[in-house]
Amino acid sequence: MSASGSPPRRRWRRYRFVPLGCAALALLLGLWTGLWRLGLPLPGAFPALAEFHGALMIAGFLGTLISLERAVALGRWWAYVAPAVSAIAAVLLIADATHYAALAFLLAGLALTFDSLVVVRHQPALFTIMLAVASACWSIGTAIWALGGHASEVTGWWLAFLVLTVAAERLELSRLLSPPPLSQAMFVLAVLVILAGVARGELAGGRADISGLGLLALTAWLIKHDIARRTVRMRGQARFSAACMLSGYFWLGAAGLLLILVPPGSAAFSYDAAVHAVTVGFVLSMIFAHAPIVLPAVVGLRVKYSAALYAPLVLLHLSLLLRIATDLLAWTDWRGVTGPMTVLALLGYAGTLIVVSRGKRPA
């Protein structure tokens, strides 16, 4: 490569640790503000930042992480624009520059959507199209936020971003089982129903039947067609990942039922229960499942499987089960217990991976 060309790949890829660090900071502050919102008397809990707990967790942490994973997969310097801008947005949000943070997150979402459309152009397939649709959901939700829209509308689009991103990635792997065209049509129908519910702003209150039916339909499709149904019969890491995914599908379906049976606003914390069934139960289960696979590519660390990973996974689900129960029964005194349990599950999972990691970088 000539001196006037772009820098070697190894040189610019090392900068991936910058957005990764910003995502980690957003996660830590998101967890901290989440505990504060549950009523725990924490020092320096940033009460002004607590209003943006969801933005820190979904846009600052998960948005940056998903963008970074996509950039690493594409292997092009321009793909790193999305995670870089998302990282800047997270820093702006932490610095209380909320309006500029929203605009930066919007640019990050648009950049991720562009990256996804590039993939569609080179590999036109249903799963690549769905990844682009998911990225567009992040952009739409952030645009509503930047324009001063209701927080529940923003959350609806952001949850669609997370759910459809995971579903699209599982759809790609389901091709190994060769689902018939009718099954793919059912997948598209489930996605359209979810998007219709989100577009109606159902998380804002009132009936949420459309969103709930969409989540239930997508859950049924994933359980039927996901390769996890087979890999759960295997051993070691394959079984653990499958267990994470299948348990995540359980919570996705639970979120659908909650939206139908106890729609937002009908109980004291029904909105909180449905949102965390998706974010904690579904999304974090997927992170638990994929982290040992993604870390070698994104961070450069090879991790070793250990059966000890089941302990934080079980704790994660117990914390969510207790949270939903306390939400629906309005046990405010017990709700504060669920937050530390979830944080301990995350720390336990990360700590276990660190301990079992070989600490080697792939060549």
Image: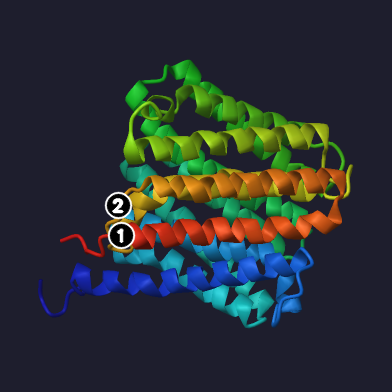
Give the secondary structure at mark 2.
loop
Residue 120 appears in which quarter of the rendering? top left
**Left or right of 296, for residue 128:** right
Dot label at residue 1: none
| Position in image of residue 32 (x %, y %) | 65, 70
* Depth order, front residue of 294/12: 294
Amino acid bearing label 2? Lys
| Residue drawn at x 68%, y 59% as measured from the top left | 339
| Residue drawn at x 62%, y 83% as measured from the top left | 95
Q: Earlier in the sequence, mark 1 or mark 2?
A: 2
Give the secondary structure at mark 1.
loop
| Position in image of residue 127 (x %, y %) | 43, 37
Residue 104 appears in which quarter of the rendering? bottom right
Q: Is residue 120 above or below residue 146?
A: above
* Depth order, front residue of 114/281: 281
* Depth order, front residue of 344/145: 344
Q: How is the image coloured?
A: rainbow
Marks 1 and 2 in Cβ contact (< 8 Å): yes
Q: Specify the quadrant that holds the C terminus.
A: bottom left
| Position in image of residue 325 (x %, y %) | 77, 43
Provide the residue designation for mark 2: 304
Amino acid bearing label 1? Ser
| Residue drawn at x 54%, y 25% as measured from the top left | 221
> Is residue 10 visible from the viewing direction of this image?
yes
| Residue drawn at x 30%, y 59% as measured from the top left | 357
Q: CA distance from mark 1 to mark 2?
A: 5 Å
> Is residue 52 visible from the viewing direction of this image?
no
**Left or right of 176, for residue 308:** right
Q: Tell me the crowding category of disc 1: few under 14, some 14 to 19, or many 20 or more residues within 10 angstroms, Cα based.
A: some
* Depth order, front residue of 351/213: 351
Provide the residue designation for mark 1: 357
Q: Tell me the crowding category of disc 2: few under 14, some 14 to 19, or many 20 or more residues within 10 angstroms, Cα based.
A: some
